[in-house]
Amino acid sequence: MKLTFLGTGGAFDVAYGNSAALVELRGHTILLDCGFTVYPTLRQYSLTDQIEYILLTHLHNDHIGSLATLLLHRRYFNPDNRPTILYPDDDFRDEVYEFLRFQLQKPDKYVDFTPVSEFPGITALDTFGLHADQLQTYAYLFEDTTQRLVFSGDLAKPETLFALLRGMPPKATTVFHDISFSEENVTHTYYKRLIPLSRDYKIYGYHCNPEEAPQDNPFPLAYHQPELMLAAHMQVSAP
Ligand SMILES: [Zn+2]
Ligand SMILES: [Zn+2]
């Protein structure tokens, strides 16, 4: 199992790409979020055809803004290989479907929809209202026999996620958590709020501008870990 970031920026930090990742799990490739910078990044690295499954944390544009373009591309250039959106519940599937209907008219022609519960090793955590008021969001947990990876999605109130983790059987756990360096930011987790929750877990921050990290930030940022960054992989493997 492996998680590789396509981008780690906040909604306006386009230089770092929208926060999104590729997850390799049980021999399959899952795209985790598809914001407006993701399709260009997938094209840049010739990865559009690799995506088998798509998971979405929520419908903000920095998480879904190029989804329709990716699906259109796939139908046009690789029509026999439709990707599948893994959805956490029927209401969310309906929201994604409606979002795509305005852009693609008939989303079923472009993509299949399957409950995420049918994919072993993925757990969706309902984080409704914990990022923005009345907004449906999800965090996702990925597990194999040896480790657990956690992706917070956009989350201002992290306590629910860590309560779930503490109730689970112990396993080597790495948490990728959105992080804010401004206490006034009410839609992401202020880094100092994560500190008391972080015992027992390896935590990497993302969805931020790394240049804004203060000296006393104890959390390593995904952006600074070459093994977590697609761009770093690609630079190493390029001729
Ligand atoms: Zn976001
Ligand atoms: Zn958001």
Image (spheres, rainbow, N blue to C red):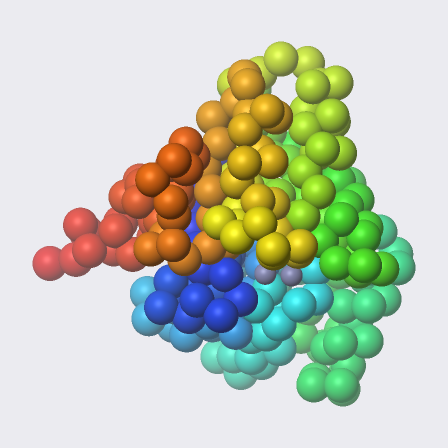
Q: Residue at x 55, y 19 (%)?
A: 199
Residue in front for this viewpoint, 218 or 29? 218
Q: Quadrant of residue 90?
A: bottom right
Give the side of residue 88 with respect to residue 75, left or right: right
Quadrant of ligand 1: it is bottom right
Examine the rendering and report whether any part of residue 22 can be seen: no
**In the picture shown, does residue 226 fall above or below 72?**
above
Residue 153's spot in the image, x, y percent?
Answer: 62, 50
Point out the residue furthest to the front here. Answer: 184
Residue in front for this viewpoint, 94 or 72? 94
Q: Quadrant of residue 238?
A: bottom left
Point out the residue furthest to the right here. Answer: 91
Residue 136's spot in the image, x, y percent?
Answer: 80, 57
Examine the rendering and report whether any part of residue 200 can be seen: yes
Q: Residue at x 29, y 56 (%)?
A: 231
The quadrant of the rendering that contains the C terminus is: bottom left
Q: Residue at x 52, y 40 (%)?
A: 191
Point out the residue furthest to the top here. Answer: 170
Residue in front for this viewpoint, 137 or 160? 160
Q: Residue at x 31, y 44 (%)?
A: 224
Residue in front for this viewpoint, 222 or 121? 222
Residue 208's spot in the image, x, y percent?
Answer: 46, 55
Give the side of residue 33 with respect to residue 38, left or right: right
**In the picture shown, does residue 225 fall above or below 136?**
above
Residue 70's spot in the image, x, y percent?
Answer: 54, 74
Q: Quadrant of residue 185?
A: bottom right
**In the picture shown, does residue 144 fall above or below 111?**
above
- How many numbered discs, if any? 0
